[in-house]
Image (cartoon, grey):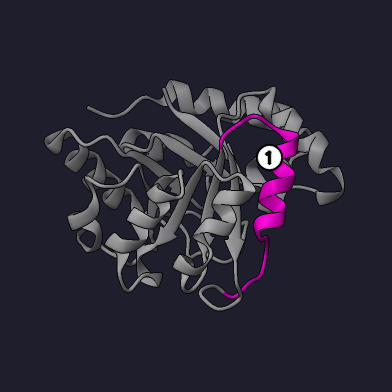
Amino acid sequence: MGKLAPSVLSADLLKLREQVTVVAENGADYIHVDVMDGSFVPNISFGPVMVSTLKRITTLPLDVHLMIQNPQNYIQNFADAGADIITVHQEACTHLDRVISQIKASGCQAGVSLNPATPLSAVLPVMNAIDLLLIMSVNPGFGGQRFIPYTLEKIREAAEFKRRDSASFLIEVDGGISLQTAPAAVQAGAEILVAGNAVFKQDSPAEACKSLKQVIQTSGRAV
């Protein structure tokens, strides 16, 4: 069954406790935390303090996505703050295998993310070492962008690799996820969908979360 990870990048921070609680009660499986440094991506967002704050608000796993340069310098900070999953970008890691080992040594699950134009082949050597593969379906840095259709083929490739090698990593997709785009992503092989504006920018985040989770669970993967 597909999982939903609402991204607090789109939440109203003045109502953070209320909104996180609402999505937790209406189908969210993870809370996604987008960490941006203004260097790897053209925006600045959260740090470890946000993660520790969320840890006090919810018992849902915290899915921390590091869109930053030199992520190896900050792994322990985010682990200590309460991250359950730490995902780094292949494009930001000179020694990706070492960073994956560092994440696992910190006690967190390890994820690797790929930008839309980065091929799956860039992470083939480490795919049996990771817990999560995050495929970006927009160019990272801002919420509210439009889903890039060609990323569906990468999702299919990842799902086929997972089936063929009996790999255990989960396939997560982030960017432009909505009621309209979620079915295609799930049918391609996505197992966790990250959604920001489609949940938190709606009139009723509770209803939006519930509706999106239902679509994710009923879409089913194409055979």
49 in magenta? yes
Name the residue at 23% across, 63% down. 122
Q: Residue furthest left?
A: 164
Image quadrant in which you'd find residue 131: top left
Residue tagged by mark 1? 55
In the rendered structure, which segment of residues is drawn in magenta? 42-61
Callout 1 crowding tier (Cα within 10 Å): few <14, some 14–19, many ≥20: some
Residue 73 seen in render: yes
Q: Is residue 42 above or below residue 137?
A: below
Secondary structure at badge 1 equals helix
Query: Residue at the spot x=67%, y=60% of the render?
Result: 46
**Which residue is nearer to you in this view: 144 or 92?**
92
* Drawn side of residue 90 relative to residue 124, left or right: right
For badge 1, the amino acid type reads: Lys
Which quadrant of the rendered structure holds the N terminus? top left
At a point 48% along the width and 30% down the height, the residue shown is 3
> Seen from this angle, which residue lies furthest right?
14
| In this view, 71 is above or below 58 | below
> What percent of the width, then of the height, locates residue 198?
64, 42
Image location of residue 145, percent across then percent down: 57, 59
Where's residue 48, x and y in %? 65, 57
Q: Is residue 68 left or right of residue 7?
A: left
Viewer-proximal residue among 39 and 196: 39
Residue 186 or 28: which is nearer the viewer? 28
Is residue 145 shown to the viewer in this render? Answer: no
Residue 117 occupies quadrant: bottom left
Q: Residue at x 58, y 43 (%)?
A: 195
Residue 35 appears at what percent x and percent y? 59, 60
Quarter of the image for the C terminus: give it. Answer: top left
The reply to whether the magenta stretch includes residue 217 is no
Residue 106 or residue 50, whichever sits in front: 106
